[in-house]
Image (cartoon, rainbow, N blue to C red):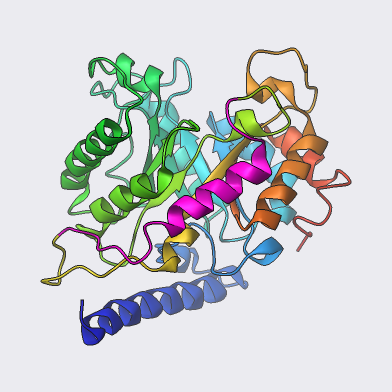
Amino acid sequence: MDVRGRKWVQAWIAIAVASAAALLLAACGGSTEAALCRPNLDPHLTPPGGGPNAYTMALRVNQASDVDEIESALADRILPRDVFVINTEYPNSKPDDWHESLERVSEKFRCNRIVTLTGLSPDPEKPGYEYALVDQPELDAVLVDWEPDTWETARQGHWTTRQAANENRIESELGALSKRLADSRVRMGLVPDYLPTWDYGPFGRVVAEQNYSIDPIHLGYQIVQTQPNCGTPAAAGPEIPAVTDRLISQYKGVIGLSLRVNGPKDEPPDITSDLLNHLGFEIAFDESPNRHASEAVERIGPEQAATCTQEILKAGGAGVLYWADADSMKAMLHSRAGLGLRQTH
């Protein structure tokens, strides 16, 4: 891409980010015009930079009552850049439940982004429906869960761990999703399993390409399921500091490559280091952990979760999706390792 074309795209991104910042300052600084908070035009998962100034929390919402608990436990720790993740895969949940959660977040946290975590289900009445809430103006993005259970539950055929096959499947699934989202402001993300054999840079490139095809200022999100690698030496792959370093290195491996898709310009731009601000990690924990539990969400406690978060930040990451309830999150932020993560405001 020539210099003029690259500068055009970068200027577009700068204008969008500046507009988002102005809206957030106006709305979250005390204005009664709540509508100014939305839409949040920031195309990144996390702000540029690193450490606590870029640290972004993604908070799980299984049901509407979770939002009330988050408000009670964490309201003074939540910043406008944080993200609420409505878990449409929550067992036995239904469309009314997802809508109620969306409305509750919109009411109580007007300046925050809201995304869904979905499966690949084509059934709009069952958990994991891929297009859940996509027609709602409050929604920022759809995060597609990418793991064996999701793939096989949707009757997509045999699951494989082959890199090339997964790149092709991700491109196909997000390509179909992008057509559904073409006339909306909702964008896409991926939440894949962590496998030591996978290279997540090409996955991030595919996510970026499919988002660019419908919105050239948004490269999507990829939040990798790194929760087993926090405080569990027996997990596949290294522990969280090395995993973070590896994922960032893999992302750096696609910087400079073309996006390979046709967007509003005749020639898409090359990928820049900005893509690193679209990468996230995952930590699961519980206020009352059981180190013998089979599920990561029950195995470690708040102090370990805070330590892993600090390790992610030190290694250069900034966005973390927490698989934990409100009380556990509060305990993490009040732990010794958590005190420096997020101050009250």
Q: Nearer the viewer, residue 138 or 213?
A: 213
| Residue farthest left in this picture | 266
Q: Judge whether 242 appears above or below 302 on screen.
A: below
Q: Is residue 131 left or right of residue 149?
A: left
Q: What span is colored magenta in the figure?
A: 236-261
Where the N terminus falls, by quadrant?
A: bottom left
Q: Is residue 255 magenta?
A: yes
- Which residue is at 53% across, 29% downward? 63
Relative to 296, say whether 30 is above or below: below
Tell me where residue 265 appears, x and y as whole percent.
14, 72
Whole-percent x and y of residue 217? 31, 67
Report the residue that reaches farthest toward the bottom: 4
Q: Which quadrant, please, contains the C terminus?
A: bottom right
Q: Is residue 244 visible?
A: yes
Q: Residue at x 75, y 27 (%)?
A: 300
Q: Which of the 4 image quarters holds residue 79?
A: bottom right
Q: Residue at x 40, y 79 (%)?
A: 14
User: Horizontal placement of 322 versus 27: left or right?
Assistant: right
Q: Position of residue 305 (x, y in %)?
A: 74, 38
Please tell me which residue lies in front, 37 or 140.
Answer: 140
The mark tally for this picture is 0
Q: Nearer the viewer, residue 208 or 166?
A: 166
Task: Give the residue drawn at x 44%, y 67%.
Answer: 273
